[in-house]
Amino acid sequence: MTSSVLAADPAIDPKMRRKALTSSVLGTCIEWYDFYVYGVAAAIVLNVQFFPKVDPFVGILLSFSTYAIGFAARPVGGVIFAHFGDRLGRKKMLMITLGLMGFGTFLIGCLPTYGTIGVAAPILLVLLRIVQGIGVGGEWGGAALMATEYAPAERRGFFGSWPQIGVPAGTLLANGAFFIMGGIIAPEAFSAWGWRIPFLISIVLVGISFYIRNKVDESPAFEKIRDAGEIEKLPVVTVIRTRPLMILKVIMMRFAENANYYIYTTFLLAYGPAVLLEKNSILLATMIMAGLGIFSIPFWGWVSDRWGRRYTVLAGAATMLVTAFPFFWAVQTGDFLMMLLALVLTCNVGRDLCYSVEPAYFTELFEPKLRYSGASVGPQVAAVFAGGFAPLIATALIGPGFDRYWLVAGYMVLTALITAAGALWSPETAPRVRRRRGLTPEYDPITNT
C-alpha cells in the first residue's frame, strides 16, 4: 500500500519554498567549489608541491589518486548522513556537511608542502581529502531532498535541478579562482603561495552559506513522517535490503555523467598541454561551459517534467556516446573554439540532460522514510567508480605519451551504454507524464507501479 506521505504534498509556505531553494543552491555551489578547487589544483600544482620526487607523469597519477580518494570517501559520508538524515532530519545533516567541507578545504590551503615536512605532507593531504569526500557525500542527497520535497509535484524536475547548478557554479568559481591567481601573480609566486588562496577563501563562503541555511525550516515531508511515527530505525540497511535493484539502476544512470564531467574538466587539464593547448585556455573553456551549465541544467530539469525522466536520461546518454570520439578530435586540432564547441555539446547537452533530472528522479524512486538513504547510497557509489577514478583511468589509458586517446574515448562510450541501460531498466516517475499515460501521478516505490 502506498504510504500516506505520498498521497499529497503538504501545504507549503511559498516564502519558505523560495528560502529552501535558495539555501540549497548556495550551499551546493559552495560545497562543490570546495570539492572542485582540489580537482583543479590536482591537475596543475599539487603534483609539484606534494609529489616532487617522482617522474612528472607519475606525479600526475599520484595527484589524481589523492583526488580519487575524496570520491572513495563519498559513500562513507553518504551512508552516515543518509542514516541520520532519515532519522533526525535533512536540515541538521546539511549544516554538518557544510562545516566538514569548509574545514577540510581551508586546512588544505594551510598545509606545509613536501619540501617543508616531507612525506607527512601527502599523508595529511589525503586525510583532508577524505574529510572533503565525507562532507560532499552527505551533502548531495540532503540538498536534493530539500529542493524536491519543497517543490510542487509537477515541477519537481525543474525545482530539483536547481541545486545541481552547484556543480557548474562550483567549477566556474574553482577554475576562475585559479585563472585569476595565475593571471595576476608571477608563476613563481603562484607555485610558492598563490595556489593556496582559492582554498583559504572557502571559509568565508562557507560562513555565508551556513547563515542562510540556518534560516530554513526542516523539510515538510520529513516532518510529516516524524509526526506519523514512520521513522525507520536503520534506513540505510533497510533500503539496501529491500531496494537493491533500484540502487543498482541509480548507479547505472549516474555513471556516464560522472565520468564525462570529471574527464572533461579535470583530466583535460593534464591532457590539453600534451596537444599544445595552454592550461589557461582550457580553464577558460571550462569556465564558459560551466557558466552555460547554470542555465542548461534548470532548462533540462524543466524539460524532464514534460518529456519524462527516462527519456531525458536516454537523450543525454545518446549524446555523450556520439560525442566521445569527436571530443578528442576537436581537442587535437589545438583550436580553442573547436574545443569549446565539443565541451559544450558533451557537457551542456549530453551530461546536463542526465544530471539535471537526478534529484527529482532519484528521490521519486524511493518512499520518503527511506529517501535520504536511497538518494545518497547509489549516487555516491557511482561517484567513486565513475567519477573519482575517471581522471586516473583516463591518464593510465592514454599513456605517458598522451597518444592513446581512442582508449579514453572508448571508455566514455562504455559509460554511456551503462547509463542508457540503467534508464531503460527504470520506471517513469514524472507525475505529468504518468498522468498522460493513464497511471497514478505518483510512482509507488513499494509496489513498483
Image: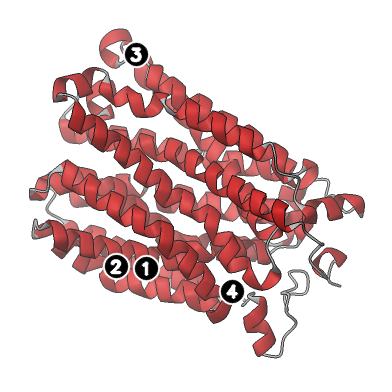
> Of label 2 and label 3, which has the lower sequence position?
3
At 27% across and 64% down in the image, what residue appears? 410
- The image quarter in which residue 318 lies: bottom left
Q: Are marks 1 and 2 in contact (CB under 8 Å)?
A: yes
Q: Check disc 2 and give the amino acid type.
A: Leu
Q: Which residue lies under the disc numbered 3?
A: 112
- The image quarter in which residue 201 lies: top left
Mark nearer the viewer, 4 or 2: 2
Whole-percent x, y for residue 80 in the image: 66, 39
Q: Is residue 416 above or below residue 56?
A: below
Mark identifier at residue 161: none
Q: Which residue lies under the disc numbered 1?
A: 350
Q: Which residue lies under the disc numbered 4?
A: 426
Mark nearer the viewer, 2 or 3: 2
Quadrant position of the N terminus in the picture: bottom right
Q: Which residue lies under the disc numbered 2?
A: 345
